[in-house]
Image: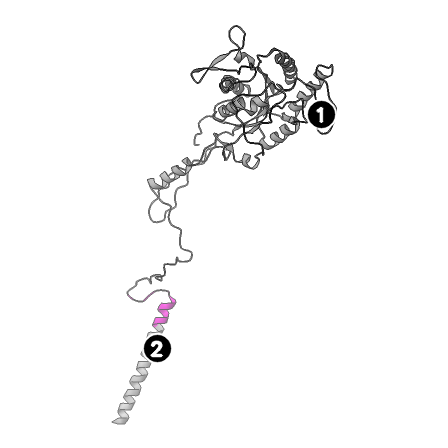
Amino acid sequence: MLHSRQRDGGTRGRLGRLGLTALMAGVMVCASAGAGCGGGEVSKPAASGAPERFAPADPVPAGPEASDDAVRAEDSEPLAPRDKPATAAAEQVPSAPETTGSTNTTGTTGGSERDATSGGTTTSEGANADETGDTTGAAGGDETPAADAATVEPPLTKVLLLGDSLIATGFGVRLESLLDKTPGVVAYRKGKSASGLARPDFFDWMREAQHQIAAREPDVVIILMGGNDGQDLTSAGKSKRRVRWKSNAWNDAYAGRVDELLARTWAPGRTIIWLGLPKMGLGSLERKLALIRTIQQSRVKTRPGAVYMETTPHLLNSDGELKVYGIVRGKRKALRADDGIHFTMAGSDYLADAILEDVLRSFGYQPPKAAQKP
């Protein structure tokens, strides 16, 4: 009996070991397949919350919420053309802080040195792409339809203002602002009070103009200077050479400087608008300016693409006399200071408002058409 029980136990032991071996083999097969063997349930990821490698990205949010976010993102950014192009940010020309005093200093040869350049934020040149396309899609990971093709507005017309105190202060500030508010136009300004073409030893407009042109690459250049030029002509650097005011050589030498400034600012396809000096109420100064205007106008007319624009007609009344008052923003304001030379701030605004359409017409301005999707 003992022998029989030992034999049966040995048989059952071998069968048990075989069953255990089969069970372990089944577990290993399930583990290698990466799935549990309990009723077909897929094994769940670990409870640690770590993302699975190569997991698909979250689907694009659909519905009005996504569209509203896109609109808010666009609205939060200033849109061209109201601001300066982004390229100008890298080309920003360092200069002294802008001065906008109550009067201009054109017509004087002294005074403090005041300078002004354009400021403001910069944005990318051209219009933003239309990013408000339909982002809704069918559930289940269908690919989101592509947005409509981007629409691009025509490039901005870049205008650069150069000149003496009339550009550095009130008049230039106002004209730059008006141009910036014109759709499709962006303006820059570089002014230097008490400067001109007579004294490059004080301020060298030949070098500065070339520097500004290279930095801004304008389509239009507006120049207004000469109110301080009724004096001896000096040379740049340490040269002591002078051309005496009222000498026989002065007219030709000054004409040569106008020609040189035109040459340094001109380029094919670019328009140069030379604004004539406004008439002054001081007789001795006005006699100087009459000669300077004549020379400037004669030289500008020889340069293709350059326009000489009179400013004085906007400042005369029906009798041909200088206006003392004008309507500015609906109110009657004095246009000149008591000396008859300097403009009041109202006078600066009055003149800038008056010539804006002439300026736009001179470079063939056309309002940009509304961009349309193809």
Q: Amino acid at mark 2?
A: Thr
Task: Say above or below: 66 vs 167.
Answer: below
Task: Say above or below: 269 vs 68.
Answer: above
Q: Is residue 119 magenta?
A: no
User: Which numbered circle lies on residue 235?
Assistant: 1
Query: For the point 64% across and 26% down, which residue is it?
Result: 205
The label nearer to you, 2 versus 1, is 1
Image check: 326 left or right of 305? Answer: left
Q: Residues within 10 Å of mark 1 (few under 14, many from 20)?
A: some
Q: Quadrant of residue 69?
A: top left
Which of the two residues, 311 or 142, is positioned nearer the viewer here?
A: 311
Q: Give the Cα distance between marks 2 and 1.
A: 107 Å
Q: Picture coordinates of residue 371 (x, y %)? A: 44, 29
Q: Quadrant of the N terminus?
A: bottom left
- In primary-sequence order, the first of circles 2 and 1 is 2
User: Which numbered circle lies on residue 21?
Assistant: 2
Q: Which structural element holds mark 2?
A: helix
Q: Which structural element holds mark 1?
A: loop
Q: Please provide the residue range marked out in magenta.
A: 26-38
